[in-house]
Image (cartoon, grey):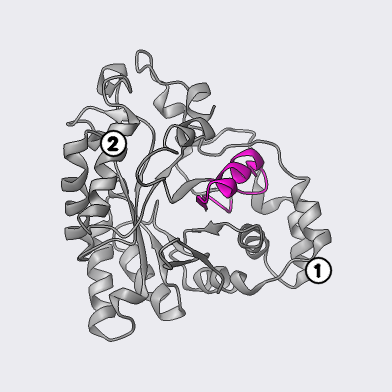
């Protein structure tokens, strides 16, 4: 499998397993199945509320000798209600306890949005903290401290625009990864160029279009990426599935991708996509599909009085 290389020589597999929306009782089995299949990159987050079950699954595969901890790349994310500098390391320590790990390979700021300490999901504008009160650079200082303490080998961000990243370029540690929604309908060429110029790796979430996300996040007339006729035609010609074409495209353009599944057959199909090579004609055809379509558009942050807007979020 292709890997992305960090300045210290560490490598991250380009295809991993996402765990957003993986239900209790299913995610642990999926983790064990994925490790047995050959997955070595796992993407987690505190807000997914399943890290303890994932940690127990890791312990079982370690105990069976399937893999050692050092063979896995494990990512997690800081939730928005722990953005003050002094809150970051304790939040990561809680995640490490849940995941039953001594360290993470990568820790990300989940969103450039700050919530009050006792708020998990905001109900109104009063649940937010303005960035003038808790600047992103304050949060980033806490992330850098986590790296200094050895709690994580690498630090990065998620859902950051070029504007957000630019404000971090003079930090002691420049964000090493930016995890964002990315797929043929949302190719983000400006962000790809910027990150390439500054040595920031990109990881694509929702690389298959996130058709299983909550109904409250869906539009009635939204396009279905997996049903796109161009993708279907390329898949047929390559003897692959549409999902495999989408993942191969992500890997081939130099990013990593973290599709989610708990189905053993789909897990195997997705992993096999890392070996699929698309020809130039297929890559050109896919490049023409960009329509700037976000499936996770961030409107859930745009509550009256919150001070956050979609326009500011995505730049």
Check the picture and name the quadrant holding the C terminus: top right
Q: Residue at x 24, y 50 (%)?
A: 146
Q: Residue 100 at what x, y percent from top left? A: 20, 65
Q: Identify the residue shown where x is 26% and y is 85%.
A: 64
Q: Residues within 10 Å of mark 1 (few under 14, many from 20)?
A: few
Question: Is the Cβ of the residue at disc 1 closer than 8 Å to that at disc 2?
Answer: no
Please report the bounds of the magenta region as a residue range: 181-208
* Horizontal relation, residue 224 to residue 212: left or right: right
| Residue 212 in sight in this render | yes
Quarter residue 118 falls in: top left
Task: Tell me where residue 1 sits by quadrant.
Answer: bottom right
Give the image location of residue 240, x and y in percent: 70, 70
- Closer to the camera, 136 or 303? 136
Q: Determine the residue located farthest toward the top in the rendered image.
A: 305
N-terminal of the pair, mark 1 or mark 2, is 2
Q: How many marks?
A: 2
Give the residue pinned by disc 2.
Answer: 139
Residue ID for mark 1: 237
Residue plotted at (61% across, 69% down): 273
Classify 238 as above or below 217: below
Does the magenta run of residues contain 182? yes
Q: Which percent across, then down, holds residue 91?
A: 20, 46
């Amino acid at each position: 499998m292709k890997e992305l290389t960090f300045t210290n020589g560490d490598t991250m597999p380009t295809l991993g397993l996402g765990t957003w929306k993986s239900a209790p009782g299913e995610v642990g089995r999926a983790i064990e199945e994925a490790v047995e299949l050959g997955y070595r990159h796992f993407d987690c987050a505190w807000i997914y509320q399943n890290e303890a079950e994932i940690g127990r699954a890791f312990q079982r595969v370690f105990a069976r000798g399937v893999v050692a901890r050092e063979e896995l790349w494990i990512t997690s994310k800081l939730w928005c209600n722990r953005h003050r500098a002094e809150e970051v390391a304790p939040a990561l320590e809680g995640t490490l306890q849940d995941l039953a790990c001594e360290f993470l390979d990568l820790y990300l700021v989940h969103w450039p949005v700050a919530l009050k300490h006792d708020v998990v999901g905001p109900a109104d504008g009063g649940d937010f903290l303005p960035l003038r009160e808790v600047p992103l650079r304050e949060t980033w200082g806490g992330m850098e401290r986590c790296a200094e303490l050895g709690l994580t080998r690498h630090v990065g961000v998620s859902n950051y625009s070029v504007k957000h990243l630019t404000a971090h370029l003079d930090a002691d540690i420049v964000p090493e990864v930016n995890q964002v929604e990315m797929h043929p309908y949302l190719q983000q060429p400006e962000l790809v160029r910027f990150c390439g110029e500054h040595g920031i790796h990109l990881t694509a979430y929702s690389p298959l279009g996130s058709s299983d996300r909550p109904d409250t996040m869906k539009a009635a007339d939204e396009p279905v990426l997996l049903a796109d006729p161009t993708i279907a035609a390329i898949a047929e010609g390559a003897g692959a599935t549409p999902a495999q074409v989408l993942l191969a495209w992500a890997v081939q353009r130099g990013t990593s991708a973290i599709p989610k599944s708990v189905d053993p057959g789909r897990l195997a199909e997705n992993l096999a996509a890392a070996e699929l090579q698309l020809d130039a004609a297929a890559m050109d055809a896919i490049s023409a599909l960009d329509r700037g379509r976000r499936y996770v558009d961030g409107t859930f942050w745009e509550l009256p009085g919150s001070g956050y807007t979609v326009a500011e979020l995505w730049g």
